[in-house]
Image: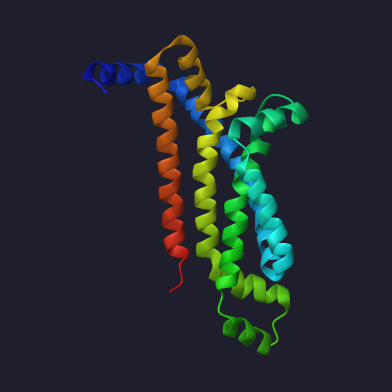
Amino acid sequence: MSGNIFSEILKYLQNNWSTLLLLIMEHIGMVVCGLLLALVVGIPLGILAARSEKTGSAILALANVIQVFPSLALLALLMVFFGIGFTSVVIGLFLYSLLPIIRNTYVGLKEVDKSITEAGRGVGMTAFQLLAKVQIPLSLSFILSGIRIAAVIAIGVATLAPFIGGEGLGKEIYSGINLRDPVKIYVSAILAALIAIFADFLLGKAQKRARID
């Protein structure tokens, strides 16, 4: 990146900070909504998968199938059913976030030492108490790792939102492509990357705190 481009980027940031701030908030909003939906659905599916190998194989296979869909193709397909805009984008981010959350919840629960589970049963804990007080806390580091991966994927996929009428930083990237304005593209891509790095850093810190050695 030449010094001239660097100074143009700084100038662009200075002149358009309020618009960029709005786009950042929209971008984060779409990602948070998609991730929250994925948590509500993905963690129970991960728990269900860990309880039965047969059911687990089916759930993981289905989540894998969703993941192999190209991002733009999946968003376009969702647009057909849910229309253009926010709803289709959030559903797409939700679907892309499911696999890492389901898989890491499944792996985390499988990694819990069976002797600890047996000890819990021995003191009279119910299945729900075992799950809530023993298995989930011991699996938390794995679950947070899944959320961390899902967040980074979702922030990247959200840059495609404008192709189906969504908002966020992708709107500025798309505008930069149409106008052949590299400064717009650089600024928006760098901001999206910084959001992903920041989310990864925060969730990484949370994961370290949750780790039980």
Q: Where residue 42 sits: x, y (%)?
A: 66, 54
Q: Is residue 115 left or right of residue 54?
A: left
Position of residue 117 measured from the top left corner of the image (x, y, whole percent): 62, 81
**Image label count:** 0
Question: Taking 171 as reference, is 142 above or below it?
Answer: below
Against 80, residue 65 (above or below) is: below
Q: Can residue 34 be seen?
A: no
Q: Residue furthest right?
A: 81
Q: Nearer the viewer, residue 41 or 62?
A: 62
Measuring from the top left, give residue 24's x and y in whole percent: 49, 30
Quarter of the image where one finds residue 7: top left
The answer to whether 77 is drawn above or below residue 148 in the figure is: above
Closer to the camera, 25 or 171?
171
Which of the 4 quarters of the picture holds residue 132?
A: bottom right
Q: Is residue 212 above or below residue 74?
A: below
Model colouring: rainbow
Report the residue at 49% width, 12% height from top: 178
Q: Quadrant of the C terminus?
A: bottom left
* 198 with respect to 115 (left or right): left
Work out which residue is located at the far top of the displayed protein and give it: 179
At 62% from the left and 74% from the top, the residue drawn is 133
Q: Residue at x 51, y 19 (%)?
A: 174
**Foreground of the two, 206 or 56:** 56
Can you see residue 163? yes
Q: Quadrant of the N terminus?
A: top left
Residue 52 spot, x, y in % from top left: 72, 69
Going by the image, does 106 lie left or right of 170?
A: right
The extreme left residue here reads 3
